[in-house]
Structures are given as C-alpha cells and as structure tokens.
Amino acid sequence: MTKRTAVLDLVLPPRAPRTPASRWLYDALRAEILEGRLRPGARLPATRDLATQYGLSRGTIVTAFELLAAEGYVEGSTGSGTFVNRVLPDELLEAGHQSATRKTSATKMKRRIADLPAPFPPFAPRPIRAFRTDTSAVDLFPMPLWAQLTARRQRRASANMLLGCDAMGYRPLRDAVADYLTTSRGVRCTADQIAIVSSAQEALDLVARLVLQRGDRACIEDPGYPGASYVFEAAGAKVSAIPVDDEGLQLRRAQMRGARLVYVTPAHQFPIGATMSLPRRLALLEWARENGALIFEDDYDSEYRYSGRPIPALQGLDQHGLVLFSGTFSKVLFPSLRLAYLVVPPDLIAAFDNAIALTKRHAALLEQAVLTDFIAEGHFGRHLRRMRQVYGERLSVLIEQARKRLDGLVEISAIEAGLQTVGWLAPGIDGEAVASAAASRNVEVTPLSRYSRRPLQRDGLQLGFAAVDADEIKRGVRELATLLESLRR
C-alpha cells in the first residue's frame, strides 16, 4: 500500500498591494523552498485547497505552479500531486562557485591544521617494550580492589552523587589531596585552593587562558615539555625557551624580561631529570616577585623518589602567592584515570572556579569519589610504597646493565626521582638515527633533540624503566649496545 504523506496548510506572507496574485504566490512559494521550509521532496497542497485557503481562483494557483515547474523548483506527477524538486536550480547555478569556495576553505583549514603541533600519541594497547617513557606499570595496579571500591560507591550512590559537585571538585577528594600534598610534598594549601581537573594539560590550558593575553611572554624550559609551549602559543603568547642545566632552569633575566608566566618541572626536570637546587628555586621566586610574574610548577612524577633528601615543592617556599602547583594521578595510578589537581593562590580561587564552571562544570564525580576512598583507606600510600620499590629495582637493573654493555656508548644520568632517565650518547652519535634503528629492533627510545628548541651540545635518549620488567630491560640494553656499536663504526 502506497504511503500517503500528510500535507499541512501553508502559511504564506501577506500579499503586497497591487501585486498580481499569481506573482505573489510564485514568489512566496519559491521563498519557502529556498529557505528550507518546503524541503526537497515535500508535497505541495492541492491547487483546489490553496485556492480555498487564500480566496484565489484555481487558475491563479495553476499559473504559479506552472511557472515554478518551468524554472525547475517543482515537478508534477499525474494523480500524485506536485512536489519540490530534489535538486533545485539555484544549487545547480551555484554549484561551481560553492565547490570552489569549499575547496578554498578546505585548503585554508588543511594549512591551519598542518601548522598545529602533532597530537600526543594515544595509549594504544600494545606490548610494553624497552624503554617506553611516561608510563607506569599498569599491570601491577590493584584493579580488583579498585573495582570493589567502585562497586561499593555505585551501590551507595545518593541523589547528591547523581546530581554532581562543585566546579572545583568533590570536596572530600579536595580535602584528601590537600592533606597529602601538605604532608608528602611540602605544599602550603587548604582544600579551598585545590581544583580537580582531568590532567596537567587541562591545568595548563586553564592557567594560560586566565593569565596570558595575546602578545604576553611565557617562559618554558629548554629542553622541556612540549605540551606547555603548545598551550602558550595557542593562547597567543610569545614563548621564550630558557636553557636548563644540572640545577634546573637557568635564570636568564634578559630572555625572561616582561614574562607573565614561567613553566618549570623542578622536582624532576622533563626530559633531563635534574632536580632544581634550593638556591635556584629561591632565586626564581624572588625574580617572579620582582617582576609580577606567576610560576607554573608541574610536579608530574615526583612521588617516585629513589635517592637524595626530599626537597619541598617550590610552592611550599612561596610567600607571596606566585606559584600554581599541578600534579596528576594518571602517572601515579593508571593513564585512563583522567584526574589531576591544580593548587591555585588564594586570590585566584574565584577566577578558576568560574572558568571551570563555564567550560566543563566539574570532573566526573564517580571517579573522584572512588579515588577519595582509595586515598582515605590507605591504599594510595601502600601502592606508592610498593611501586617505589619496584621502580627503584628496575632503575638499578638498567644502570647495572648499562655499565656492563653500554660503557663508552651511553652514560646513564644519575636521577633521584621519576619514571625515566636519560642516556647521554657518545659524541658524534645522532639520536634520531639511534631511535630509527632501535625501532626496527622493537626498542623504544626518544632523542632529547625532539624536546629542544636549539641544537644540543650533546644528544641523548630518554629511557623509561618504570613500566618495563627486568628481562625486557636486559633485552633492550643488549639491542641498544649492538646497534650503537654498528653506528659508531
């Protein structure tokens, strides 16, 4: 049985005085078609119905319909009625112009996209190889325990849990984070200063949008974390790359003149691994105070410290509210847990509260509640202690194997914390060549030159050990030794 489409009455604009009825009807129907109120394929009312509705003769309606059909706007089917054409004449006439316009727009878009930095590599499910960086040993995370805590929270979910929480985050989690940072990292803060975000990258983006205006200067470490420069440049800032040494960021006052924001990784410099010395920290704080600048302290993996006396966070030394302190649970626990924190100075709390509320409202509440239980019940501390021991043992294996097989080829940096270290290459060995050759042997290394804006005096490789077990570390060192010997020849 043929489906009959219901046709509703058409509401057309009033006819202007002295306008012929057929011309008015033609113009009104054509406008309805072109503006999309009568869609392609739509059935027009019968001529008899339109004549009755608007008090016109049927001949006037037929004249208007015939004119529309002659110009290609409608088509008639005997016994079925009159329908709007699937392809309108205006589209055919403008097709070439629109195609050219779309092509030009697409070209501009491709150029704009090409100018953007490459996105971060996805956490693809692939075998862990030596020496993968920025990754924790997710296979050792107590997932059954996490699942139990999640199930318990879901069983006890209240109406408030289903509604949401404050923009700055779930208050019990903010309390737990403030206690942890005060005790373990020497951070001076209250729960009111804690903002729960999805990542340190989101924290950077928030800070850049609230602190930087187009044309402002922002300073980064060189070599350093590229995600910081991406965000600052996207905000329209002028980025100054400041050299680092074995004491951290060098205070280059001429290069830093007029800067509104400085990004640093003082606990474990990315990617070199140096710890910023206390004198350097105090000098940076004094410079920021004198110049009215803010400091973004990225504490991305300092929970894992293997040697040396713990140095308090830069934020803990700040007496003037100049430091924004950020850390992430994704590095400490597992990458898909998109929860991190940002400690903001007291006078900026309202601004960050409003910014988060306007953008994402708040972080996912269930995950925040489960993490709160994980911390409050002592599981977080136990997990840190266990993983600190595991990672320390894996670092020891890497250093021992490198001493046996890579002597004269790679010098392993003496780091005190973190998930990766640096292997400095012998003079004349190119890091990119090593990375390419290593990939063919299922070994992952990242040249330091990829993180630097200026030529390095000596290239090196970033070597991750936290996610890699002892046997894989040994295999990776053997493969690296073989290919470095061949490159040196």
Image (cartoon, rainbow, N blue to C red):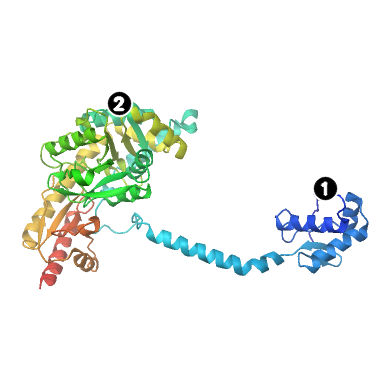
Q: Whole-percent x and y of residue 167?
A: 42, 33
List the residue tagged with mark 1: 14
Please indicate, yes or no, whether residue 1 appears anywhere in the rendered image.
no
Screen quadrant of the C terminus: bottom left
Viewer-proximal residue, 43 or 101? 101
Quadrant where the N terminus is found in the figure: bottom right
Task: Please tell me the numbered disc located at residue 190.
Answer: 2
Nearer the observer: mark 1 or 2; the answer is 1
Q: Is residue 347 visible?
A: yes
Q: Position of residue 286 (x, y in %)?
A: 19, 33
From this view, report whether residue 107 is shown above or below residue 316.
below
- 306 horizontally vs 143: left or right: left
**Residue 289 - label:** none
Nearer to me, 276 or 382: 276
Residue 292 place in picture, x, y as percent: 27, 34
Label 2 Cα crowd, 10 Å radius (few <14 / some 14-19 / many 20+): some
**Residue lying at 83% horizontally and 67% vertically, measured from the top left:** 77
The residue closer to the viewer here, 143 or 356, is 356
Specify the amino acid type for callout 2.
Answer: Thr
Counting residues from the start of the chain, the first of labels 1 and 2 encountered is: 1
Helix, strand or loop at label 1? It is loop
For image coordinates 41% across by 32% down, the residue present is 353
Q: Position of residue 474 (x, y in %)?
A: 15, 59
Q: Amino acid at mark 1?
A: Pro
Q: Quadrant of residue 266?
A: top left
Q: Is residue 125 left or right of residue 451?
A: right
